[in-house]
């Protein structure tokens, strides 16, 4: 267990080679250490080594058939390999194991989204939200499903509903970076005047204060700089909006 924890610290620091060695040492001492297999599979996923991750996850499931997380991770690996039927089978089993798991329904939603079944994707994300309203991820995923779903008569998607979902994500977790990114882009695309575009700058200013990492800060600062440049150019040219459509 100590070796697994040390390996996790190495992973967090980006020292993958040392982490691999520690996982191997832990598994040499006890080949039935399910946690070592699970965490090593995560490292393999970070290295885009899907085959090795799949092998570790399958071994972990054999050791701990009641353990939900490795099944969910395995479904992710299969989705990454475009094996949606395999992922669907695993996730159906997960749902039978724990029908009240928000995480299971979020994974189901991602699987449906990947196969283009937006109706079932949105339904799964809605279920995840009901089961765990404090988790921002399904709000964002539901918003993306809405934005990819044409209107009833083939018209534009329900932008208002998507915005509401993204705003809810920020409300439950003010530090959730993805919500600021998608909401800012959506608001900017719908801005009918420069005042509305300026509101996006204010949104990014809020997001900048809530960043969890330097990467998030760099990302949202870049978007803010671009938006400020667009608004200033619009003002300088006497334009009413930055959207030319």
Image (cartoon, rainbow, N blue to C red):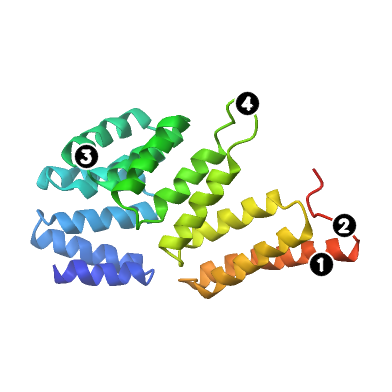
Of the pair 97 and 63, the residue shown nearer to us: 97
- Say if residue 76 shows up in the picture: no
Indicate which disc residue 99 carries.
3
Q: What is the total number of numbered labels drawn onto the structure image? A: 4
Sequence-first tag of 2 and 4: 4
Q: Earlier in the sequence, mark 3 or mark 2?
A: 3
What residue is drawn where x is 71% and y is 59%?
Answer: 196
The spot of residue 48 in percent (x, y) is 40, 50
Q: CA distance from mark 1 to mark 4?
A: 35 Å
Residue picked out by circle 2? 239
In what element is the residue under mark 4?
Answer: loop
Task: Give the alpha-carbon distance from disc 3 to disc 1, as whole Å.
Answer: 51 Å
Q: Is residue 136 visible?
A: yes
Q: Which mark is residue 232?
A: 1
Q: Residues within 10 Å of mark 1 (few under 14, many from 20)?
A: some
x%, y% of residue 184? 61, 57
Mark 4, residue position: 154
Mark closer to the observer (1, 2): 2
Judging depth in this view, the residue of 97 and 165 nearest the camera is 165
The answer to which of marks 3 and 1 sits earlier in the sequence is: 3
Q: Residue at x 49, y 72 (%)?
A: 210
Contact (Cβ within 8 Å) of mark 3 with mark 4:
no
Q: Quadrant of residue 151?
A: top right
Q: Position of residue 181 (x, y in %)?
A: 57, 58
State the separation of the CA atoms marked 3 and 2. Answer: 53 Å
Classify 101 as above or below 37: above
Secondary element under disc 3, as helix, strand or loop, is loop
């Amino acid at each position: 267990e100590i070796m697994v924890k040390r390996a996790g610290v190495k992973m967090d620091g980006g020292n993958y080679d040392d982490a691999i060695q520690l996982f191997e040492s832990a598994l040499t001492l006890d080949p039935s250490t399910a946690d070592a297999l699970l965490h090593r599979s995560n490292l393999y996923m970070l290295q885009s080594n899907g085959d090795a991750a799949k092998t570790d996850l399958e071994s972990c499931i054999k050791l701990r058939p009641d353990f939900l997380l490795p099944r969910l991770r395995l479904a992710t690996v299969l989705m990454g390999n475009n094996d949606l039927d395999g992922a669907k089978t695993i996730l159906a089993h997960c749902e039978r194991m724990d029908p009240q798991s928000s995480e299971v329904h979020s994974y189901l939603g991602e699987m449906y989204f990947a196969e283009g079944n937006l109706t079932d994707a949105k339904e799964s994300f809605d279920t995840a939200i009901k089961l765990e309203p404090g988790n921002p991820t399904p709000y964002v995923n539901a918003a993306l499903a809405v934005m990819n779903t044409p209107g009833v008569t083939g018209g534009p998607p329900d932008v208002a509903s998507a915005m509401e979902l993204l705003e809810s994500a920020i409300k439950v977790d003010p530090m959730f970076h993805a919500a600021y990114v998608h909401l800012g882009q959506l608001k900017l695309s719908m801005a009918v005047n420069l005042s509305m575009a300026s509101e996006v700058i204010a949104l990014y200013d809020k997001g900048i204060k809530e960043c969890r990492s330097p990467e998030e800060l760099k990302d949202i600062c870049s978007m803010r700089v671009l938006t400020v440049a667009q608004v200033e150019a619009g003002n300088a040219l006497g334009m009413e909006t930055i959207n030319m459509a």
